[in-house]
Image (cartoon, rainbow, N blue to C red):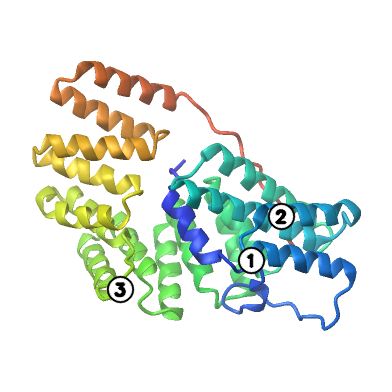
């Protein structure tokens, strides 16, 4: 399973924050007609939506659960509760600066259970199906994410973010050509989308088309040259590509910029640590790899790389600790994930 970083959670949060009512947004999900007069039941759901939009997620959860206690056959209420549980994952990651893997898994599965229950009573719309898919992304179940994103996009083919996340799902399934097609569609709908261009570069790199990957990363970097807030992805991915091409010295400036933009991103520190190690700047390599491990303590490969560096530095006691931790993490197993064989929604 590919590690789900805190940066992904923050990207998801930036995409969806404040969009509980996105069914009225044609770029995010199929719209449902607004009703001029709210019944008491509709008013309760509207209140929960308002609380969620304002970031009061625990209050929103309490409100919708209270409503469901008396209206357990409300599809809309189950879908809304699933969305709130999903949002709580990002809120926790944003507050703590990293993903809590156990909390993430528990809440993602609980959110999926709510969508499953809601689909018994009402057909999910495009936005609902996208949230289902993103919960699967957080569980590392990319084939399921692919399935539900595809259904979501059938209902709303103009969803820019939907195409982006479909590309990510297919990339993680190693269906690289299909991933490239999804990212290109995202770019057709939203030219100069930095994340889509960056990920198109990842596709080219996976297909061993390094010149095209290099050009895509450089294009994504150029598109945000004047932006006050930059995306670290193209810098990190370009630096990693240069590392793969044995150009560690050339990689250092890009990876350093990636770390400066996203100091909480473990993979940036890890790649920069590797670059410093290959250029024999071992003190800096140690600093960066230790930071990477601190940010992602459950990533076995990072403990292994740090252990190897400690060996190189002659720090044998520290090396043994890191390699033991690697073995411990590699011996753990995640919980199985159940598929939903449903036509209209998750069952």
Proximity of marks 1 and 2: CB atoms separated by less than 8 Å = no
Circle 2 is placed at which residue position? 59
The part of the image, by quadrant, that contains residue 297 is top left
Q: Give residue 277's position: percent from left, percent from top.
A: 15, 38
- Residue located 48% across and 44% down the image: 99
Q: Earlier in the sequence, mark 3 or mark 1?
A: 1
Alpha carbon distance from label 1 to label 2? 11 Å
Q: Give residue 140's position: percent from left, percent from top.
A: 52, 46
Q: Secondary structure at mark 1?
A: helix
Within 10 Å of disc 3 (Cα), the crowding (few <14, some 14-19, many 20+) is few
Circle 1 is placed at which residue position? 53
Compared with residue 31, is residue 87 higher up or lower down, i.e. above or below?
above
Alpha carbon distance from label 3 to label 2? 36 Å
Report the disc number at residue 282: none
Q: Is residue 256 visible?
A: yes
Q: Give residue 293's position: percent from left, percent from top.
A: 33, 35
Compared with residue 237, is residue 4 higher up or lower down, i.e. above or below?
above
Circle 3 is placed at which residue position? 227
Q: Is residue 346 visible?
A: no
The part of the image, by quadrant, that contains residue 296 is top left
The one of 178 and 155 positioned closer to us in this rendering: 155
Q: Give residue 178's position: percent from left, percent from top.
A: 44, 63
Q: Earlier in the sequence, mark 3 or mark 2?
A: 2
- Residue located 87% across and 51% down the image: 69
The one of 15 and 329 positioned closer to us in this rendering: 15
Q: Is residue 130 left or right of residue 258?
A: right
Marks 3, 2: nearer the viewer? 2
């Amino acid at each position: 399973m590919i590690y789900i970083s805190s940066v992904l959670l923050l990207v998801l949060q930036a995409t969806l924050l404040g969009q509980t009512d996105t069914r009225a947004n044609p770029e995010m999900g199929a719209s449902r007609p607004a009703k001029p007069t709210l019944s008491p039941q509709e008013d309760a759901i509207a209140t929960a939506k308002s609380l969620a939009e304002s970031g009061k997620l625990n209050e929103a959860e309490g409100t919708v659960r209270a409503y469901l206690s008396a209206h357990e056959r409300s599809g809309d209420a189950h879908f809304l509760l699933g969305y709130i549980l999903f949002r709580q994952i990002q809120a926790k990651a944003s507050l703590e600066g990293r993903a809590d893997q156990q909390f993430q898994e528990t809440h993602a599965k609980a959110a999926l259970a709510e969508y499953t229950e809601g689909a018994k009573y009402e057909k999910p719309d495009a936005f609902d199906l996208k949230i289902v898919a993103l919960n699967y992304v957080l569980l590392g179940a990319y084939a399921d994410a692919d399935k539900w994103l595809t259904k979501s996009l059938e209902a709303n083919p103009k969803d820019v973010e939907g195409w982006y996340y479909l590309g990510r799902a297919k990339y993680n399934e190693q269906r690289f050509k299909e991933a490239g097609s999804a990212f290109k569609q995202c770019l057709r709908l939203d030219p100069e989308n930095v994340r889509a261009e960056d990920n198109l570069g990842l596709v080219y790199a996976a297909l061993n088309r390094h010149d095209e990957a290099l050009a895509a990363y450089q294009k994504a970097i150029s598109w945000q040259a004047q932006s006050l807030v930059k995306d670290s992805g193209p810098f990190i991915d370009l630096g990693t590509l240069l590392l793969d091409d044995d150009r560690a010295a050339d990689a250092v400036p890009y990876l350093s910029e990636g770390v400066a933009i996203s100091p909480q991103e473990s993979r940036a520190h890890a790649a920069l640590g590797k670059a410093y190690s290959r250029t024999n700047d071992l003190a800096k390599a140690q600093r960066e790899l230790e930071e990477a491990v601190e940010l992602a303590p459950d990533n076995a490969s990072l403990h292994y790389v740090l252990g190897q560096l400690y060996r190189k530095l002659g720090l044998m006691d520290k090396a043994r600790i890191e390699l033991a931790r690697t073995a411990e993490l590699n011996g753990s197993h995640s919980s199985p994930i159940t598929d939903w064989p449903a036509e209209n929604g998750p069952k």
